[in-house]
Image: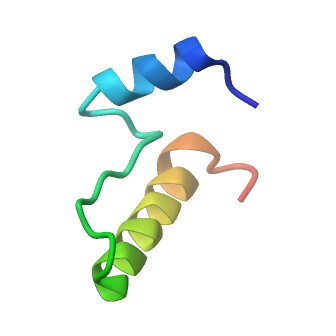
Amino acid sequence: MISELEVVQLLSDLESFRVERTVATKDTEKFSQAICAFAMIWQVHICPDFC
């Protein structure tokens, strides 16, 4: 689990590989695309040897 300070730092970093942003709250297709984009970035950049 990450600390509150880490969350604030991630929210302020607009180019973080650890955060995928979307304004969609009701458009499930757009929200699903954001989740898939985050998963692909995670696999390629953050844990290529683990995933």
Query: Farthest front residue?
Result: 26
Query: Farthest bottom residue?
Result: 29
The answer to whether residue 37 is above or below residue 15 is below
Residue at 32% over, 79% down: 26
Left or right: 47 as drawn, with respect to 44 = right
Q: Nearer the viewer, residue 37 or 51?
A: 37
If the image is split into quadrants, where does the N terminus sit?
Answer: top right
The answer to whether residue 34 is above or below residue 47 is below
Q: Quadrant of residue 27?
A: bottom left
Q: Quadrant of residue 33?
A: bottom left
Left or right: 44 as drawn, with respect to 13 = right
Q: Position of residue 48 (x, y in %)?
A: 62, 50
The answer to whether residue 13 is above or below residue 42 is above
Q: Position of residue 29 (x, y in %)?
A: 33, 87
Residue at 33% over, 70% down: 25
Residue at 24% over, 32% down: 14
Q: Nearer the viewer, residue 9 or 16?
A: 9
Q: Position of residue 34 (x, y in %)?
A: 36, 67
Left or right: 6 as drawn, with respect to 2 = left
Q: Position of residue 51 (x, y in %)?
A: 71, 59
